[in-house]
Each structure stands twice: as structure tokens, then as C-alpha cells.
Image (tube, helix red, strand yellow):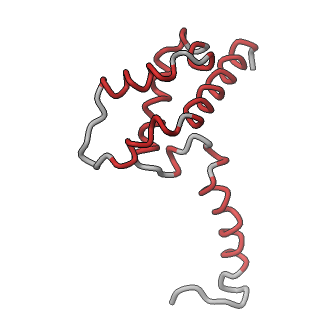
Amino acid sequence: MSIKREITEKAKQNFQELLLENAEIFYHFTSVGPGSVITQEDINKITEKLQEDLRYKTLDRLDQDRMLMLLRHLGFVHGPIREHCPASLKCMDTLVEKPLLKKLIDLSPGRGIVIGY
């Protein structure tokens, strides 16, 4: 991996941390109904609160990537599902699922316990 790419990835990780650290900014979006729309004004208010942080400024040259990350984060806050989890493979749902699946396999047919009919 090139140094430029490593720096970019680290900047994106830092920005993701910034989004997670500022949960209070996103809190009211958790109660927005399924048919509701997040407006440009909402986005402007959020960016206004984040833009003074160095982790926001670091991605100035990657504004589209930063906006995409912000929108994905809003999507996750609004409808938290594993596929949108900012922690990706370290998402708690994924981490919990692995040992549960192993346990299920260990208890599956042929191992003494019948699951289903």
C-alpha cells in the first residue's frame, strides 16, 4: 500500500471516529420516520459543528468521500443494520454472530441435537 493511500485511510478512520464521538449531533435522526428526508439544511448544521475539528479538515481534498461517509453514518444512525455499521467486520453484531454460529454448528444434526424437523 502506498504512503498516500495509508495516509488517506488513516484520515478516513479518524473522521469516522469524529462522527462516532459526536453522537449527540446525530441523536435526533434516530427518531426520524421511514418516510422522512434529511435535508441539505440538516447536513449543513452537522458539518458546521464538525468543520472546526482537524479530523474534518484533513479530508478537505476528499470532500466527496467525506460527504459519503457522513451520509452513510446518517443512514446507519437512522436505520442501524450490520451492513452499514461503521466498524465493519468489528461490528458487535458480527462479533457476536461468529461464536453463536460455531455453537450452532457444534450442536447441529449428527452431533446429538436435532434442529428443526
Residue extending farthest to the top is 61
User: What residue do we see at 27% from left, 37% from top?
Assistant: 37
Q: Quadrant of residue 71?
A: top left
Residue 77 locus on image (x, y percent): 45, 44
Q: Quadrant of residue 19?
A: top right
Question: Is 60 positioned to the left or the right of 106 in the image?
Answer: left
User: What residue do we see at 68% from left, 62% from top?
Assistant: 98
The vertical placement of 78 against 101, above or below, is above
User: What residue do we see at 48% from left, 51% from top?
Assistant: 81
**Quadrant of the snapshot with the N terminus:** top right
Question: Is 41 positioned to the left or the right of 10 in the image?
Answer: left
Residue 76 locus on image (x, y percent): 46, 43
Residue 106 locus on image (x, y percent): 73, 77
Residue 60 or residue 54, whichever sits in front:
54
The vertical placement of 52 against 40, above or below, is above
Residue 67 locus on image (x, y percent): 45, 23
